[in-house]
Image: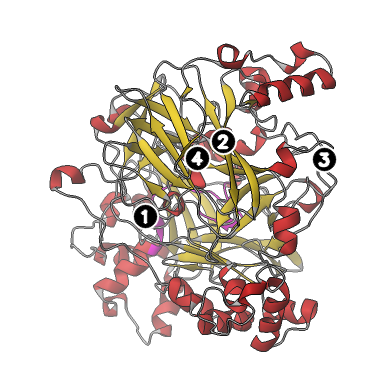
């Protein structure tokens, strides 16, 4: 087992005092006076100085990793940032008894590795940071862990019960040490070493969906785990991998430098949304696979009548195959990574009274897309294929509730596998007529950090490229820091680059540099992040599937930097207009003006129409970089350097792939800030009755 880079923790008290409560939370703050806080003890000292952890200390001492060089107690005795889930001697004894053992000495070295590495995350997480969610960083065994909450009656009083992976109860939490936090658990923390289909098959609550996955062989598609073809050409090239210590990879972007590393290994992940048998029975009277087959035909025959006679259930055109494969994504999606609602301060940058945060993902059903939303208000939570704003209709009078995704506490006992995660949902989801003609008859805004499944796959450091943490203690490293310099050792930001040939949905050559930027609250990027493309680049991108129709494609970007480039766009090989010079600002490009300078709503609408006819749009009104405290609290719509460029148009039959190509036209190269794209149906951008909303 490889020992990873230890992160420096500048001040743990800043984390304790900053209580970032989750959007959906059931924890009560215990109060600062109830925390144990030491500025002298390291995590290793804390454990060794208390006799109730003596057997766990023995396990840590015996765990040496695959190469025999892992010294966990030494690591926990250094500066860094760690969460330790420490089992008491009683917990260890119960575990040993369950295996017919009486002593830690009977455990193998591999047993000790598993127990120890499952118990440590190389990032400090307090119960006030997350209380009903998956942790954003994996443990040292590269497994994702969760914390959930329930009630416990003791002495006639109802108390909060916090569980790790729903199996290990926190009996004492949030003891702060100078290099992290120690939580005491009443059971050994376990995680699964199985692939996602195997983990789901053990769940009797979803037997009908599991049978559908088996007979269609969609479960076989979900067994991919590691790309054995991925690697590095030489040891020299290997220094790029997940170290963030290579000065040559401090990449200049606009007025600062991004610290970039490449993944050491390449994994494949999946996310499944499963309807429990009880809900199928209660809502639809479905009690067996035949009932599900009938429901699949009911939903998909009106949309794909040409496939009515496809009886082979392993055929991707078969209705049951379409049905069950639509419930699976080819990426990792926990409760707080499927949208930009991350339980942190980024949420405050949005006007959530006007806009439901959402993202769009391709599913395993060929040529289909799923929408995931996180509204605020009385119906707050995570939903699939929802349309509206909060609990009401949108500005075009449409409301579709969608299927709600269960929280961690409401979900499966063991939702995580080595290659993915699954969630319970309270209704079936389908790419049916309602989804295609109503929910998706809307502007489809796709964040560029979601365009490839590889941007949302767990890396060898236990995190994803999208939303990667940085080396600062504020917000647990959740957000980056602007203005970083070219020295890697002094640059706290962690951005992830992708080598040509190993980035799904993208095609580019070795002289094209692509990396996913970490989120920075006050940068001019929607949702705080973006895809940075540099060099004499030539990139082909497979657009997300959309229903049949005519669409307009737009690009959101930040202009007005001398380092930007001149980009020519193509759709399906056809040039779209003249090249886009990204160096001038909005005033120079199309006469940009603030809304409050234009006058009333009619004047604003007229101006929007006039610039749209020229191929331009202002940025969205729903997002303010930095929230209320930065840029005067102005949304992107009021900033002359955050604009949308209309790239072109295309028609699709809804059953074909479409390719967007972006080509740098400056011989010396340049950079492209690739923030989001919009795939907008003609019923929205060319509607004589409804003006497209400003959000």
Which of 518 and 212 lies nearest the eye of the viewer? 212
Q: Mark 3 points at which residue?
A: 395
* Picture coordinates of residue 382, whole percent (x, y): 67, 55
- Checking the image for residue 143, the label placed there is none
Q: Mark 2 points at which residue?
A: 648
* Picture coordinates of residue 238, whole percent (x, y): 20, 46
In magenta segment, residue 600: no
Q: In this view, does 622 lie above or below 601?
A: below
Determine the CA span between mark 4 and mark 1.
32 Å
Residue drawn 34% across and 45% down? 498
Determine the CA span between mark 4 and mark 2.
36 Å
State which mark lies toward you, 4 or 2.
Answer: 2
Q: How crowded is mark 4: few (under 14 residues within 10 Å), some or many (20 or more)?
A: many
Which of 558 and 522 lies nearest the eye of the viewer? 558
- Checking the image for residue 478, the label placed there is 4
Q: Which of marks 4 and 3 is nearer the N terminus?
A: 3
Magenta segment boundaries in residue numbering: 118-135
Q: Where, by quadrant of the figure, is residue 608 drawn?
A: top right
Determine whether the residue tagged by mark 2 lies in a helix, strand or loop.
strand
Q: Which of marks 4 and 1 is nearer the N terminus?
A: 1
Q: Earlier in the sequence, mark 4 or mark 2?
A: 4
Q: Mark 1 points at which residue?
A: 49
In magenta segment, residue 128: yes
């Amino acid at each position: 087992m490889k020992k990873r880079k230890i992160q420096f923790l500048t001040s743990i008290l800043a984390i304790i005092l900053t209580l970032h409560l989750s959007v959906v939370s059931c924890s009560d703050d215990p109060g600062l006076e109830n925390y144990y806080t030491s500025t002298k003890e390291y995590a290793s000292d804390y454990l060794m100085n208390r006799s109730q952890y003596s057997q766990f200390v023995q396990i840590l001492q015996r765990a040496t990793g695959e190469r025999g060089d892992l010294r966990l107690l030494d690591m926990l005795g250094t500066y860094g940032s760690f969460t330790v889930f420490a089992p008491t001697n009683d917990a260890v004894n119960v575990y040993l008894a369950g295996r017919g053992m009486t002593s830690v000495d009977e455990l193998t070295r591999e047993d000790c590795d598993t127990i120890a590495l499952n118990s440590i995350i190389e990032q400090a997480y307090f119960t006030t940071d997350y209380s009903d969610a998956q942790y954003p960083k994996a443990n040292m065994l590269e497994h994702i862990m969760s914390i959930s909450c329930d009630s416990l009656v003791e002495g006639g009083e109802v108390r909060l019960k916090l569980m790790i992976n729903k199996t290990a109860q926190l009996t004492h939490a949030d003891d702060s040490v100078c290099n992290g936090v120690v939580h005491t658990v009443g059971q050994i923390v376990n995680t699964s070493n199985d692939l996602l289909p195997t983990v789901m098959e053990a769940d009797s609550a979803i037997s009908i969906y599991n049978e559908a996955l088996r007979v269609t062989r969609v479960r076989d598609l979900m067994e991919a785990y590691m790309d054995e073809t991925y690697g590095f050409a030489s040891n020299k090239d290997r220094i790029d991998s997940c170290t963030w210590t290579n000065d040559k990879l401090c990449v200049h972007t606009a007025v600062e430098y991004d610290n970039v590393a490449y993944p050491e290994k390449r994994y494949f992940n999946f996310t499944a949304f499963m309807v429990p048998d009880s809900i199928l029975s209660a809502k639809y009277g479905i009690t067996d696979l035949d009932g599900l087959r009938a429901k699949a035909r009911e939903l998909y025959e009106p949309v794909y009548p040409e496939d009515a006679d496809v009886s082979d259930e392993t055929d991707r055109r078969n209705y049951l195959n379409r049905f069950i494969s639509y419930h699976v994504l080819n990426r990792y999606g926990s409760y707080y990574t499927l949208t930009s609602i991350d339980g942190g301060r980024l949420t405050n940058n949005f006007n959530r009274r006007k806009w439901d945060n959402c993202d769009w993902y391709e599913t395993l059903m060929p040529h289909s897309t799923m929408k995931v939303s996180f509204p605020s208000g009385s119906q707050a939570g995570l939903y699939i294929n929802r349309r509206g704003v909060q609990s009401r209709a949108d500005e075009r009078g449409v409301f579709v509730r969608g299927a709600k995704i269960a929280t961690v506490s409401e979900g499966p006992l063991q939702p995580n596998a080595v290659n993915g995660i699954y969630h319970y949902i309270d209704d079936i989801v389908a790419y049916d007529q309602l989804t295609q003609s109503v929910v998706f008859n809307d502007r489809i805004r796709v964040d560029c950090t979601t365009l490839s499944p590889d941007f949302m796959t767990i890396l060898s450091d236990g995190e994803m490229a999208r939303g990667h943490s940085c080396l600062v203690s504020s917000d647990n490293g959740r957000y980056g820091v602007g203005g970083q310099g070219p020295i890697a050792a002094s640059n706290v930001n962690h951005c992830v680059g992708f080598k040509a040939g190993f980035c799904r949905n993208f095609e580019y050559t070795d002289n094209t540099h692509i990396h996913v930027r970490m989120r920075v609250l006050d940068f001019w990027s929607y949702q705080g992040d973006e895809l940075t493309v540099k060099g004499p680049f030539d990139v082909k991108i497979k657009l997300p599937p959309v229903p049949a129709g005519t669409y307009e494609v737009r690009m959101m970007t930040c202009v007005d930097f001398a380092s930007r480039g001149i980009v020519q766009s193509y759709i399906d090989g056809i040039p779209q207009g003249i090249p886009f010079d990204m160096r001038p600002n909005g005033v120079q490009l199309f006469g940009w003006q603030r809304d409050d300078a234009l006058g009333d709503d009619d004047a604003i609408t007229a101006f929007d129409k006039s610039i749209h006819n020229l191929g331009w749009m202002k940025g969205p009104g729903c997002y303010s970089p930095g929230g209320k405290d930065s840029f005067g609290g102005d949304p992107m719509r009021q900033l002359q350097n955050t604009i949308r460029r209309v790239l072109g148009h295309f028609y699709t039959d809804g059953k074909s792939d479409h390719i967007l190509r972006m080509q740098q036209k400056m011989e010396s190269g340049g950079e492209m800030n690739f923030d989001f794209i919009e795939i907008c149906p003609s019923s929205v951008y060319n509607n004589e009755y409804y003006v497209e909303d400003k959000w």
